Amino acid sequence: MGFAASQARLMGLISQQYDIELESQFIESRKIQLANITNGLFDMQNKLEVGSSAYKLLEGRIRQLSQADKILDMQLKRLSNQRDAIMKEEESTQKIISKNIEMSFGMMK
């Protein structure tokens, strides 16, 4: 791979890495929102009689929010795996660029 192509590849990888970081931040924000909503539902549930229909309704909603949180965790894991793969490819591309520089400018010594 030529120097210019390697540089372009590196810039593309860095862009992908920033996109993944941004998406991860959005997911973390959603997880915080879910946690706040869940805490509010628990507070409401604690004021109700155990076994009442409202209590059971809130219990079901809390389970749904828990499932949504697990889905977000899976998305974060997927993004983490993607980030790791991009970082490895970025390191490889950096080595190629270094070798290209050494080959191009090392001859001038």
Image (tube, rainbow, N blue to C red):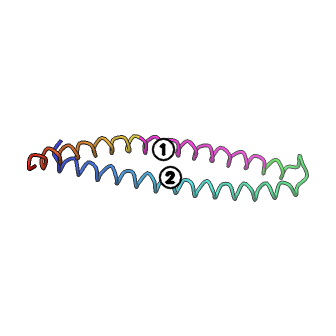
Crowding at dot 2, Cα within 10 Å, few <14 / some 14-19 / many 20+, comes out as some
67 over 25 or under it: above or below: above
Residue 78 included in the magenta stretch of the image: yes
Camera-side residue of 56 and 66 = 66
The residue at the point 38 percent across, 44 percent down is 87
Instruction: Tell me: 96 left or right of 13.
Output: left
Circle 2 SS class: helix
Circle 1 SS class: helix
Look at the magenta stretch and give its main secondary structure. Answer: helix
The residue at the point 72 percent across, 54 percent down is 38
Quarter of the rendering occupied by the N terminus: top left
Instruction: Tell me: 30 left or right of 97.
Output: right
Quadrant of residue 21 in the image? Answer: bottom left
Residue type highlighted by circle 1: Ser
The residue at the point 41 percent across, 54 percent down is 19
- For marks 2 and 1, the one nearer the N-term is 2
Identify the disc placed on residue 4: none
Q: Which residue in the protein does label 2 denote? A: 24
Q: Which residues are magenta?
A: 59-84
Residue 108 included in the magenta stretch of the image: no
88 over 4 or under it: above or below: above
Instruction: Tell me: 101 left or right of 72.
Output: left
Q: Which residue in the protein does label 1 denote? A: 80
Instruction: Tell me: 41 left or right of 22.
Output: right
Residue 56 percent across, percent down from the top left:
82, 47
Cβ atoms under marks 2 and 1 closer than 8 Å: yes
Residue type highlighted by circle 2: Ser
